[in-house]
Image (spheres, rainbow, N blue to C red):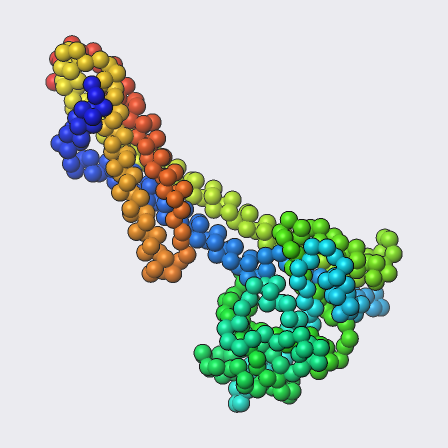
Amino acid sequence: MSIVMTFRIALKALNRNKMRTTLTMLGMIIGVAAVITMVALGNGASQSIEQQIASAGTNVIMVMAGNFTTGGVRQGAGASNTMMPSDAEAIRSEVPGVQYVAAGVDQGAQVVAGNQNWFSRVQGTDVELPLIRSWQTESGAFFTSADVASAAKVCVIGTTVRDMLFGEGVEAVGQVIRIRNQPFKVVGVMTSRGQTAMGQDQDDVIFAPYTTVQKKFRGITYIQSVTVSAASADSIKKVAEDIATLLRARHKILSGDPDDFMVRTLEDIAAMRTETTRTMTALLASIAGVSLLVGGIGIMNIMLVSVTERTREIGLRLAIGARGRDVLTQFLVEAIVISLLGGSIGIGLGYGLSWGLSRFLEWPTFVSPDAVAVAFGFAAATGIFFGFYPARKASALDPIEALRYE
């Protein structure tokens, strides 16, 4: 019997019991739709995590002043005053694989504009910080190297600071704010970044030349940190080791003595992303397995019922010359047709659910072609696996006993 004729007979047999066929497909539809929707949610979550990592800087290495101990009391990380701006310049010029460098000094301060005030974090930094963190200005521009050299009273503010001092969406470039009673001209506003995974508002920040923060607020000559961007992700570990070696030599730290600085990379964030992805993958695999298993059991159940109902038909076909493999192929094709039709409808439903979650719940989703292909392939495989036993049972019927069946 030709494959075309086999498909025609299969469709005719399924069409005789439309309701039962539809209910059988429903399990496969729900299973495939669940797989595609959950994969879309997982992909969207992964992209969101990657964007958060990128917002912190893709190849960032943080060099921070270390611990300072006085009278046996440890003052904690950042208390050491041995890191100098010259160390940042040495990292820039002497360490291979370094792309951008920005010295840093932080200071919390009360900020006033007109009759409004707000407590924020003043981050003294250098001109390459926006390049390190891939952070653009929404309006205006970042301060310049000349501003850093002259310790100019200029600043770039985040959107949270702008909204609190001037009002939401109000143009702040050119305005003057007072930081600890000293006037600063706003030369730019950064684009909004939102919160970090730890809940910190990235937009609640004021960037100023680190030299200005040193002289006007802290009265110091040292720096607290150096933010470094490696030229490539593969070189991060090597660059971090070279920075540590350079600073130990510059600070004249003897072998065996502890460092007076700390070098940190984003490996912990990368590890978190990997673990999150593994957990999400395991969750999706479990959901997909359960959903498709339920759909497959439904197909097996309905095909067994169909074999029982059509026992006399099977016996008649065998009696007039049909071979066992023809009967097996017939019922196997019916199971596959149910699976593929249910899978096709499930793919469409999965796309619709993903679009609905993205549009109405503002949940990030991304349907990948690979997920669609895998879901459709699993639907076909499920039909073959769960349809084989009923088909094999039908092909093994004795023609005489089948014809006697009531």
| Residue 357: quadrant of the picture | bottom left
Question: Vertical placement of 286 versus 142: above or below?
Answer: above
Question: Vertical placement of 143 versus 301: above or below?
Answer: below
Q: Residue at x 70, y 80 (%)?
A: 151
Residue 390 placement, left or right of 229: left
Question: Vertical placement of 43 versus 299: above or below?
Answer: below
Pinpoint residue 331: horizontal percent, then vertical percent. Answer: 23, 24
Residue 243 placement, left or right of 20: right
Q: Is residue 344 visible?
A: yes
Q: Residue at x 31, y 44 (%)?
A: 347
Give the quarter of the figure containing the N terminus. Answer: top left
Pinpoint residue 387: horizontal percent, then vertical percent. Answer: 29, 26
Q: Residue at x 59, y 54 (%)?
A: 269
Q: Residue at x 59, y 51 (%)?
A: 270
In-front residue for pair 59/391: 59
In-front residue for pair 22/8: 8
Q: How many marks?
A: 0
Question: Vertical placement of 38 versus 69: above or below?
Answer: above
Pinpoint residue 396: horizontal percent, then vertical percent. Answer: 25, 14
Give the quarter of the figure containing the C terminus. Answer: top left
Q: Is residue 120 visible?
A: no
Residue 118 placement, left or right of 397: right
Pinpoint residue 243: horizontal percent, then vertical percent. Answer: 75, 57
